[in-house]
Amino acid sequence: MKDLWSWIEKNRFTVILPVMGLILWVVAVGCEPATPSPFSGKLVNAEELKIDFLAWQNQQEVIMEKFKFAEADIAKQKAAWDEFTQVLLQLASGSVAGWPGLLQILLGGGILGVVSDNIRKNGVINGQKMSIKATAKSTVTT
């Protein structure tokens, strides 16, 4: 070990210059420019930045397609709603919207409501009568 150290002492530039060259080579080859990616936030080189850009671009295209689909869905729902509204208006007033049509809808709905309520109430009353009769029969037999 002592002989090696003495040889390095005598030939120091022969040792130092190749070591410095190796360090410079590692720095020149091993260190490439990097920047934080706007897409992922991690440090990337130029090639990775292009890949991140393409990924971002593809994601934007997917989002644009989703927005186009949503717009088409809204347009379809609006068309169906407009058609439904027209059908209601035609039923209400013989295809002329106005006060007579509104009155016809309100009176027709009210009459249907009264009839429905009477049917429901009759069912409740009959159910109570049957439960009273069943209770009376069970108390008579015991």
Image (spheres, rainbow, N blue to C red):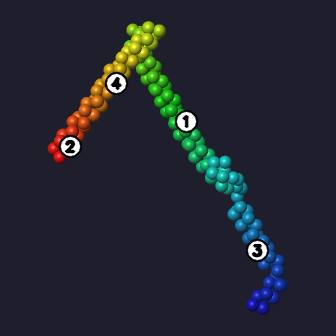
Q: In this view, does 18 lie above or below 47?
A: below
Mark toward the start of the polypeptide (3 vs 1): 3
- Residue 95 location, x and y as percent? 41, 9
Marker disc for residue 131: none
- Residue 92 location, x and y as percent? 40, 13
Q: Quadrant of the N terminus?
A: bottom right
- Location of mark 1 (residue): 64
Residue 20 in which image quadrant: bottom right
- Residue 12 location, x and y as percent? 82, 80
Residue 22 in which image quadrant: bottom right
- Location of mark 3 (residue): 19
Residue found at the far bottom of this picture: 2
Q: Residue at x 66, y 55 (%)?
A: 42
- Location of mark 4 (residue): 117
- What's the amino acid at mark 2? Thr
Mark toward the start of the polypeptide (2 vs 4): 4
Q: Residue at x 32, y 20 (%)?
A: 115
Question: What crowding class fits label 4: few (fewer than 14 Cα within 10 Å), some (14-19), or many (20 or more)?
Answer: few
Mark 1 element type: helix
Mark toward the start of the polypeptide (2 vs 1): 1
The residue mark sitting in front, 3 or 1, is 1
Mark toward the start of the polypeptide (3 vs 2): 3
- Location of mark 2 (residue): 139
Q: Determine the CA span between mark 3 and mark 2.
A: 113 Å
- Label 2–label 1 contact, CB within 8 A: no
Q: Determine the CA span between mark 2 and mark 1.
A: 75 Å
